[in-house]
């Protein structure tokens, strides 16, 4: 029989190799951090079910409506750009808690907004929290995750985002059904669309409360010279074996004479590091393929081509469910197949499906300025739209967040991720605010542009993206 010391050693090996015991703790910690993604998804999609009622209630024209929908993205861009510096100065957990407070304020402010401009103001406040959460959640998860499961844990961010989208759309649907329409009075005389926004207070409070139960990032602690705290946390996460050497290696990669700043994004030759431009390109392409048009405007889109509001809600919820399922597929495969192959497959599939949608809308009969899908056109458009969601959900959705959290060296991770995420939100804003006008002009043109961007993303990946599967964060070079 093996000795007790041998059994203990085997058990420790099992923990390190399989992550059975220690891994559960890491998954729990990563899941709490990923709740920021859930709020990100919820805040982004909640406007979908409310947009028609908001337009009617405030008598908004297409331009004002587009700005109201996209306004949160302006705040998100600003929040993302600020999050990196705050995270390096105050810590990762402090930024999570600030984001939770901003979400809560936004939920209350938008729910009781007396005018469209007040609603826009509080959408921007919520967007600020979205941007901060979008930066800090993947950065934190990457910094606490063992390298061999980092892809799966990093993909929890996207799973949380799509779950937030699904929950938001489902709550919108339930409230609208119970009230008899999104613009109808509901509890306490408030219109249904107001309760759609107010419901965001629940996950905001949950996120803030649970952030009190997880440890600070050990890499942040090492960067701020709190080595004993970092060592204790790392020991709990990855075991005691070679812990001193690991701490020292992390310390060497984060050694700096000056406080963290945007200067960290420069390479030794004084120019912006190549990896920064690549990260920014990834973030821009993720948005320019038009995925958020599906989740921000799908109700309006499907009503415009002949479905009623109830059918549009159901179609949107089905798309959100598909997004969750395909994200689970990505989580299961990302550490096996790698990041780059999934991006390549996704780019090809998105190009095909978006081109199909462009052709369908381009050949549809136009009645009162809107295309009407007849015969097989409706089912083909629905299948193409949902296959597009499948392609995105198993590739560019989760993989981009994983890559952005991994590809920057330790010394510039927060700043690099902050800049890339800021670029992502600006790109999201451009796509979101221009879609109503493009829709009125030509849906075929809109989806044709997104298809072109999907095709260009394929060449971008082939030329610039390097595989990060299995690499330690300390091995990543800028």
Image: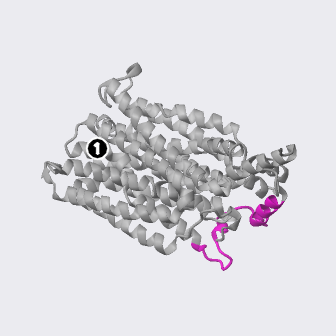
Residue found at the far front of this picture: 1
Tell me where residue 456 appears, x and y as whole percent.
39, 70
Report the front residue among 83 and 277: 277
Above/below status of 72 relative to 416? above
Residue found at the far bottom of this picture: 269
Q: Residue at x 77, y 52 (%)?
A: 221
Report the front residue among 453 and 95: 453
Q: Is residue 160 left or right of residue 377?
A: right
Q: Residue at x 86, y 45 (%)?
A: 3
Residue stretch rendered in magenta on the structure: 245-274
Determine which residue is flagged by label 1: 300
Above/below status of 200 relative to 21? above
Q: Quadrant of residue 402?
A: bottom right
Is residue 63 shown in magenta?
no
Is residue 248 shown in magenta?
yes
Residue found at the far top of this picture: 188
């Amino acid at each position: 029989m093996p000795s007790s010391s041998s059994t203990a050693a085997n058990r420790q090996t099992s923990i390190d190799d399989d992550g059975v015991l220690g891994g559960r703790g890491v998954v729990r910690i990563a899941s709490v951090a990923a709740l920021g993604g859930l709020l990100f998804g919820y805040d982004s999609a909640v406007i979908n079910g409310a947009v028609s009622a908001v337009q009617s209630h405030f008598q908004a024209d297409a331009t004002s409506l587009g700005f109201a929908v996209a306004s949160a993205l302006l705040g998100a861009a600003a929040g993302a750009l600020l999050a990196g510096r705050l995270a390096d100065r105050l810590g990762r957990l402090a930024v999570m808690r600030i984001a939770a407070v901003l979400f809560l304020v936004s939920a209350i402010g938008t729910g009781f907004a007396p005018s469209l401009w007040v609603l826009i103001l509080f959408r921007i406040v919520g967007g600020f929290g979205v941007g901060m959460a979008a930066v800090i959640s993947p950065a934190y998860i990457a910094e606490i995750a063992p390298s061999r499961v980092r892809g799966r844990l990093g993909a929890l961010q996207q799973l949380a985002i799509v779950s937030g989208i699904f929950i938001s759309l489902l709550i919108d649907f339930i409230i609208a059904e119970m009230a008899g329409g999104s613009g109808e009075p509901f509890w306490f005389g408030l219109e249904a669309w107001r309760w759609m926004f107010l419901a965001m207070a629940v996950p905001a409070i949950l996120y803030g409360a649970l952030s009190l139960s997880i440890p600070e990032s050990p890499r942040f602690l090492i960067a701020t010279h709190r080595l004993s705290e970092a060592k204790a946390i790392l020991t709990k996460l990855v075991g005691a074996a070679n812990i001193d050497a690991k701490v020292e290696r992390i310390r060497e990669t984060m050694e700096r004479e000056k406080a963290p700043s945007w200067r960290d994004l420069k390479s030794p030759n004084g120019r912006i590091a190549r990896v920064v431009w690549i990260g920014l390109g990834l973030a821009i392409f993720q948005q320019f393929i038009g995925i958020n048009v599906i989740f921000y405007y799908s109700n309006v889109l499907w009503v415009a081509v002949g479905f009623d509001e109830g059918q549009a809600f159901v179609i949107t919820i089905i798309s959100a469910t598909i997004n969750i399922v395909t994200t689970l597929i990505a989580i299961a495969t990302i550490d096996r197949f790698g990041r780059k192959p999934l991006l390549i497959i996704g780019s090809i599939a998105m190009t095909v499906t978006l081109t199909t949608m462009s052709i369908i809308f381009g050949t549809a009969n136009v009645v009162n300025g809107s295309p009407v899908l007849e015969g097989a056109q409706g089912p083909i458009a629905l299948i193409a739209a949902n296959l597009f969601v499948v392609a995105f959900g198993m590739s560019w959705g989760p993989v981009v967040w994983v890559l952005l959290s991994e590809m920057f060296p330790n010394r510039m991770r927060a700043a690099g991720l902050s800049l890339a995420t800021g670029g992502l939100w600006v790109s999201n804003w451009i796509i979101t605010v221009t879609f109503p006008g493009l829709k009125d002009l030509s849906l075929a043109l809109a989806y044709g542009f997104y298809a072109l961007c999907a095709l260009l993303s394929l060449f971008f990946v082939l030329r610039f993206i390097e595989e990060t599967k299995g690499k330690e964060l300390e091995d990543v070079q800028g």
